[in-house]
Image (cartoon, rainbow, N blue to C red):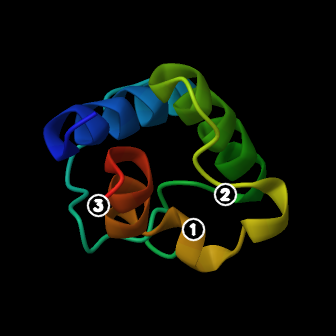
Amino acid sequence: MNKEEAKNAIGESLATVLGTEVDGWEENTNLIDEGYLDSLDSMRFLFELDKKVGKKVVEDHEVELESFQVSFLLNRISGE
């Protein structure tokens, strides 16, 4: 999956969890720090993202605040 496809998967997962399309996030956005996700939504988001991309993006033991940095997620999904 390339970075554009990964970005789309992130956006679709956010929309699924939040129930609406979300604009304004970029590669340097941390989805928790900037208020897009709370603690419960963050776990639902990772679950949705895993389903969309067909693999585990962040292992359970790896989950930390930096795991919700869009650039981190893009790199994990696209393998770059």
Residue 22 image point, x, y percent: 31, 39
Foreground residue among 75 and 44: 75
29, above or below 25, in the image:
below
Instruction: State which quadrant residue 58 falls in.
Output: bottom right
Residue drawn at 25 percent across, 57 percent down: 25
Q: Which mark is residue 80?
A: 3
Q: Residue under circle 2?
A: 38
Residue drawn at 20 percent across, 39 percent down: 2
Q: Earlier in the sequence, mark 1 or mark 2?
A: 2
Residue 34 image point, x, y percent: 43, 71
Residue drawn at 20 percent across, 46 percent down: 3
Badge 2 amino acid = Asp
| Number of residues whose C-alpha sits closer than 10 Å to that of mark 2, classed few (under 14), some (14–19) or many (20 or more) | few
Measure the C-alpha gap from mark 1 to mark 2: 13 Å
Residue drawn at 32 percent across, 47 percent down: 78
Instruction: State which quadrant residue 73 falls in.
Output: bottom left
Q: Earlier in the sequence, mark 2 or mark 3?
A: 2
Badge 3 amino acid = Glu
Measure the C-alpha gap from mark 2 to mark 3: 27 Å
75, above or below 44, in the image:
below
The reply to whether the C-beta atoms of the residues labelled 1 and 2 are less than 8 Å apart is: no
Badge 1 amino acid = Ser
Numbered disc total: 3
The reply to whether the C-beta atoms of the residues labelled 1 and 3 are less than 8 Å apart is: no
Measure the C-alpha gap from mark 1 to mark 3: 15 Å
Mark 2 or 3, which is nearer the eye? 3
Foreground residue among 3 and 65: 3
Foreground residue among 38 and 58: 58
Q: Residue under circle 1?
A: 67
| Number of residues whose C-alpha sits closer than 10 Å to that of mark 1, classed few (under 14), some (14–19) or many (20 or more) | many
Report helix, strand or loop for mark 3: loop
Instruction: State which quadrant residue 21 falls in.
Output: top left
